[in-house]
Image (tube, coloured by chain):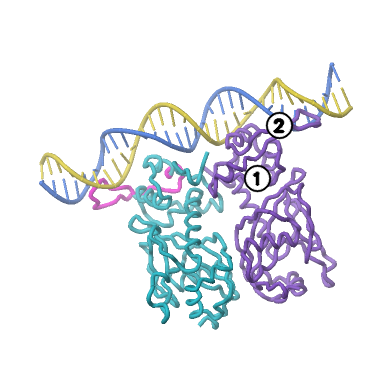
Chain colours: A cyan, B purple, C blue, D yellow
Amino acid sequence: MSGIKNLNPHVSVDCVIFGYENQQLKLLLIRRTLHQTIQDAPDRFLALPGDLVLEDEDLNEAAKRVLKELTGLDNVFLEQFAAFGAPERVKKEKDRQWLRSVRENPEARVITVAYYSLIDAAACILQPGSFSAQAVWVPIREVPELAFDHNEIFENALDELKRKIQLRPIGFELLPDKFTLSELQSLYEAILGRDLDKRNFRRKMLRSGFVTPLEEKQQGVANKPAQFYQFNRQKYEELGGAYVNLRLEGDDDYFLN
Amino acid sequence: MSGIKNLNPHVSVDCVIFGYENQQLKLLLIRRTLHQTIQDAPDRFLALPGDLVLEDEDLNEAAKRVLKELTGLDNVFLEQFAAFGAPERVKKEKDRQWLRSVRENPEARVITVAYYSLIDAAACILQPGSFSAQAVWVPIREVPELAFDHNEIFENALDELKRKIQLRPIGFELLPDKFTLSELQSLYEAILGRDLDKRNFRRKMLRSGFVTPLEEKQQGVANKPAQFYQFNRQKYEELGGAYVNLRLEGDDDYFLN
DNA sequence: TTTCTTAGTGTACAAATGACACTAAGTAAA
DNA sequence: TTTACTTAGTGTCATTTGTACACTAAGAAA
């Protein structure tokens, strides 16, 4: 099945897609198509969406294409964050079984270039295809053992996210177009894995200029309705690749003084 | 020549090695071995030290090995920072000529994993080998056109360095074991490409706790002798992968408020 | 002894940080 | 209709950090 597409047997891309839904940060995984010999332990066959790159395809294009093929997601901005190339990463027996069933050159050593992305899980429609039987959101605290070195890749991506979110206003990508500051704060808390002070958080976000209040308020909630805000995408784009100080208090793990 | 070593034709590593010498930030380049058809334009054949990885070799090991083979440098800590995989990156005619003379599979598409490192240029001994005729330090403002996409790789590494140096105390790697605060400041200025205020710089560095004064002072200089300092490597290691606030003033390009 | 060069220091104002507790606005239940 | 419940939203003070800025100190060389 792979031969037709002219795949490069040694280079793959993997996508760590973070989503946010019901106050939880989640990871997008695919369940690899079941195969005669491996029907009995489906949970051991969850994996990051990823595949070999085409022989003549840019890495970034490959990541987009693979993500689309495996999950149906389109127009996702993917950021490359690391390459993984331990020779043993494709040598575990359980992975080789699957590789033999699906790859033309199943013994090949493969290095993978990893990407991450943030999307609004609630707003996206998953349409698994080709060799993924299913695409599923899994809360980040409940990620099981994954294929290959995908657990390591995911952990690295999460660390990267914890750091980057305090240097660039990227959290907004996980939320709907309009959101309340409490929602934004919950999101940050879910990512950083710790509670934040409400007043300090609001001050920081408002001062940064990346959120703009809308006219609209929440409706029909059983409490004081919250103001909706919008992400200031223009200001974000003016930033280019620059870093911004979005450091949040209590961050002994990632910033010291 | 390559066949014996069992190289992976599709994956290479490239090393962006920064050194500091005579108040200048420099880049380590190799001059590719000259060949009958390309003897006349030696400057067009400068490149980052890099080569294909071995079929069964970890990427980090490959980077170390290649660096050692091409420049003689050993025990260098290399940090991976990006992968480059545009299909056209190995398709320029001038590069293909060279590839044909040296690679078993010269038409192969190659993605490269890039590493950077900081070393004390004054203290290191270059011993070019295999297909590098020469290893040379080039001031970063005078880097000529390089092989493949190596200019792009270098520029990315420099950007990364400018950002990272304000988040982790890595500049010390470029200096001798003992150094003065003025030397440290010159180094930061060379990297960031702008002047810094002396008093503010010293306060920041001293407050960070990453520099410890030694007993010793400069000797035989025609002015007030400066205090020597030492990098606090233990504190650095306690940091793990964490970021620290080493942001320096006037940094409109990389931090905004 | 003078000159030259680089080292080294302090202050004042502005801005950001961090810790902390109550009132406001709505719905639902009694 | 009153009360209870829930989440939104706000301000202050003490401390730390950032920034701008100019003079004296120590040594060698002339």
The numbered disc on residue B119 is none
Residue C19 percent location from the top left of the image: 39, 35
Q: Quadrant of the N terminus of chain B?
A: bottom right
Magenta stretch contains residue A102 = no
Taking the spot 52% from the left edge, 38% from the top edge, the residue there is A257
Type of amino acid under label 1:
Gly
Residue A199 appears in the picture as rendered: yes
Label 1 – label 2 distance at C-alpha: 18 Å
Disc tally is 2
Left or right side of C27 for B170: right
Question: Which residue position holds label 2?
Answer: B227
Taking the spot 71% from the left edge, 38% from the top edge, the residue there is B179
Q: Residues within 10 Å of mark 2 (few under 14, many from 20)?
A: some
Q: Chain of mark 2?
A: B
Task: Mark 1 vs mark 2: give the one in front.
Answer: 2
The numbered disc on residue B171 is 1
Specify start and end residues of the magenta stretch as a single range. Answer: A205-227
Residue A50 percent location from the top left of the image: 49, 70
Residue A65 appears in the picture as rendered: no
Type of amino acid under label 2:
Gln
